[in-house]
Amino acid sequence: MKTTTRMGNMIQDVLTMFKRCMLMTVRNIDALFTGIAQPALLMFLFVYVFGGAMNVGNIDYVNYIVPGVILQCIGQCAGITAISVNNDLKKGIIDRFRSLPIAKSSVLIGHALAAVVRNVITTVLIIIVALLIGFRPTANLIQWLAAMGILFLYILAITWLSIIFGLISSSAESAQGLTIVCILLPYISSGFVTTETMPAALRIFAENQPLTPIIESVRALLLNTSPDGKILISVIWCLGILFISYIIAVQLYKHKLSK
């Protein structure tokens, strides 16, 4: 009975922290507008400004770039998460929570859940905008579920990585700065151009970094083409980043609480 009660209390604490994080997101008008407008602006920019100059084979450019835009916007959302965690840490909010009779882990989990919701909304917005401007996926239900599953794993991985950035940074600005890697990596991949067009050294990096198989797996699933074994590689990358990031984030958080 005590175990059940403790678990119920922890779930309630997590939900409370989740609601708090979501309220902070809604009240931050700049971040809310950016999260809604940015996906649409990126799609319009790449399709209508750069699209005519891009050669990606026999695939319409809008069909080609959707996975890359999704991952790039997920990287942008990582900055919001890192800043939120860092603000709680530097402004003493976590110290206040520590003095309350709540599950200590509920603070990080609340941030993580809010980040997942923000990223899911962003992903849906990108797909809607893409459909409006010509994106024509040919995936069946199973392929859609598989593609969304890979993206969900990636969201979880980037969420916990961004929490680490928030915990180790000395300020909100530096926390956001560290997330630049999440924003840049989609560009140095097959997300927006084929890797064959890159210089040799950059091409080697692009073809062997984690985001390329993730992007190519999602693209293949949505366009009903062969993923060439990239799905398993994508899942391994996502789970590996998620596991390592989660362990490091939890240990860092415990260290911060022990001070």
Image (tube, rainbow, N blue to C red):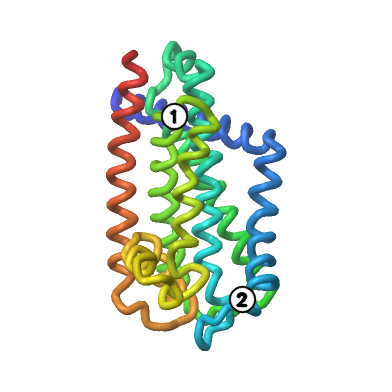
Image disc number at residue 169 = 1
Point 55% across, 82% down: residue: 55
> Residue 77 location in percent, x, y?
54, 46
* Element type where label 2 sits in the image: loop
Is residue 141 among the parts visible in the rendering?
no
Say whether residue 109 is left or right of residue 204.
right
Mark 1 crowdedness (10 Å alpha carbons): few <14, some 14-19, many ≥20: many
Question: Relative to 137, is 177 above or below?
Answer: above
In three-dimensional space, the C-alpha distance between marks 1 and 2, rounded to whole angstroms, equals 39 Å
Question: Relative to 183, is 188 above or below?
Answer: below
> Residue 98 location in percent, x, y?
42, 15
Q: Amino acid at mark 1?
A: Ser
Front position in the image: 113 or 4: 113
> Residue 199 location in percent, x, y?
41, 71
Please tell me which of labels 1 and 2 falls first in the chain.
2
Point 39% across, 55% down: residue: 153
Q: Which residue is mark 2?
A: 135
